[in-house]
Image: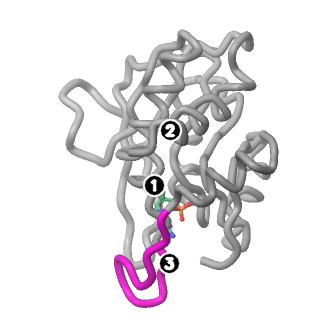
């Protein structure tokens, strides 16, 4: 991506201070999604490495990962697998806990969503501490998936999520980095 596209993409993301609570600078991608050329650019860039890479499934994390992941899956001709908050999927599931700031939550997938050995790319809008994505990688691996990479529009590098996923052996691709939280 050239520097003009990068700046345009960065400028399409709205930053909202103190949401959902004081001290958090929320990176809101609804403005990017509503802007047709920017949505197209983000999907093109997220999909770029995977066009001919034999990826059979894109796994997207609820909820913004569904929007981006669905579009990328369609672009590269892969299937889409949703990773959901617990209690939303109707068939037999597998679950993985992950830490929230206060307490623990769980994400889940259908047990039959993937076949062992299947190459998968994980997609979400943003990586912060990496806790959610780490749980998603573990969930995918628990079904035998081969997690080829994790891709995000936004990286918050100071929160260490990228390093955390790389320590698990998962390459990380991000489009735009913001300093701070
Ligand atoms: P983490 O597990 O800490 O990497 O957090 C990642 C998840 O939380 C993603 O699904 C993001 O959408 C959301 N998230 C975390 N921090 C922010 C932020 N500053 N702005 C927008 N979304 C965030």
Q: Residues within 10 Å of mark 2 (few under 14, many from 20)?
A: some
Q: Residue at x 49, y 30 (%)?
A: 59
Left or right: where does residue 78 sit relative to residue 180?
left
Quadrant in which the N terminus appears? top right
Indicate how the structure is coloured in the image. Answer: one colour
Q: Is mark 1 within 8 Å of ligand 1?
A: yes
How far apart are labels 2 and 1 at the CA level?
A: 9 Å
Q: Is mark 1 on a helix, strand or loop?
A: loop
Q: Does the residue labelled 3 lie within 8 Å of ligand 1?
A: yes
How far apart are labels 3 and 1 at the CA level?
A: 13 Å
Residue 150 forms part of the magenta stretch: no
Residue at mark 3: 25
Residue at mark 2: 39
Q: Residue 29 carries which label?
A: 1
Q: Please state which of residues 151 and 164 is positioned toward the viewer in this rendering.
A: 151
Magenta extent: 14-25
Q: Residues within 10 Å of mark 1 (few under 14, many from 20)?
A: many
User: CB under 8 Å between callouts 2 and 1?
Assistant: no
């Amino acid at each position: 991506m050239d520097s003009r596209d990068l700046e345009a993409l960065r400028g399409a993301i709205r930053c909202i201070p103190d949401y959902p609570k004081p001290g958090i600078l929320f990176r809101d991608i609804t403005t990017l999604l509503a802007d047709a050329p920017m949505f197209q650019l983000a999907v093109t860039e997220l999909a770029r490495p995977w066009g001919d890479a034999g990826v059979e499934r894109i796994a997207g994390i609820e909820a913004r990962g569904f929007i981006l992941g669905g579009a990328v899956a369609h672009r590269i001709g892969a299937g889409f697998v949703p990773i959901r908050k617990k209690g939303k999927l109707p068939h037999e599931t597998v679950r993985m806990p992950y830490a929230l700031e206060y307490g623990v939550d769980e994400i889940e997938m259908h047990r039959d969503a993937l076949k062992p050995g299947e190459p998968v790319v994980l997609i979400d809008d943003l990586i912060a501490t990496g806790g959610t994505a780490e749980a998603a990688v573990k969930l995918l691996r628990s079904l035998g998936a081969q997690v080829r990479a994790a891709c995000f529009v936004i990286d918050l590098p100071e929160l260490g999520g990228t390093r955390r996923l790389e320590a698990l052996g998962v390459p990380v691709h991000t489009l735009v980095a913001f300093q701070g939280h």
